[in-house]
Image (cartoon, grey):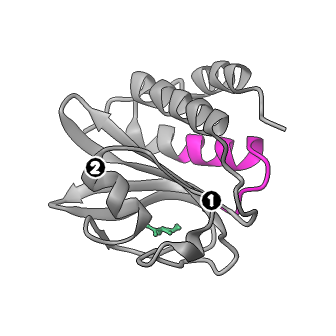
Amino acid sequence: MTPDYPLLARQLEALLDTRDWLTNSAQASAFLMQEIPELNWAGFYLHREPETLCLGPFQGKPACHPIPFGKGVCGAAARTRQTRRIADVHAVADHIACDAASAAELVVPIVAGDRLWGVLDLDSPVKGRFTAADQAGIEALVAVFVERTDLQ
Ligand code: SME
């Protein structure tokens, strides 16, 4: 069943009551992990070095770091600034396997002005977990995060 994303967006708005990117991204990753069913990893990669994603606040197993823009699902989302919704990560040749349990992945780029600030990465152990409705809902949650946070 698709989560009630409009409700989650209102709850996230209430939760993100600082403008601080570190506090808000830590809270957002914990919130997503708690509220979205069937995830094994939820977190942020930050664009702090040229063409490179650095691991940020997350929930789940220790993860891969760093990820160059040229590699993996996260790299592709960062490079193209478009959401990547992958039904079966094992079908993606350069998928980076951090947790062997991951089967499906959704990566949403986070853009502040004209700058790529980072990406939000969600992994699921269930193949095909993320529908188009999940993508739209999670992109709306990312929009709340962007709106509520001073992104540096
Ligand atoms: N699977 C990702 C790497 C990050 S982890 O899933 C947390 C990728 O291929 O970019």
**Residue 62 visible to an observer of this rendering:** no
Relative to 50, residue 111 above or below: above
- Disc 1 residue type? Ala
Q: Quadrant of the C terminus?
A: top left
Which residue lies under the disc numbered 1?
A: 87
Residue 7 falls inside the magenta stretch: no
The magenta-colored residue range is 26-41
Tell me where residue 67 appears, x and y as whole percent.
Answer: 33, 71
Q: Which percent across, then down, holds residue 78?
A: 31, 53
Tell me residue 1's x, y (percent): 84, 38
Q: CA distance from mark 1 to mark 2?
A: 19 Å
Residue carrying label 2: 80
Q: Label 2, secondary structure: give it.
A: helix
Query: Is residue 28 inside the magenta stretch?
Result: yes
Q: Secondary structure at mark 1?
A: loop
Residue lying at 62% horizontally and 27% vertically, measured from the top left: 12
Q: Along the horizontal axis of the image, is 117 left or right of 15?
A: left
- Residue 57 lies, with reference to residue 139, above or below; the image says below
Please, which residue is most extreme toward the front here?
91
Looking at the image, which is closer to me, 4 or 91? 91
Q: Residues within 10 Å of mark 1 (few under 14, many from 20)?
A: some
Residue placed furthest toward the left: 50
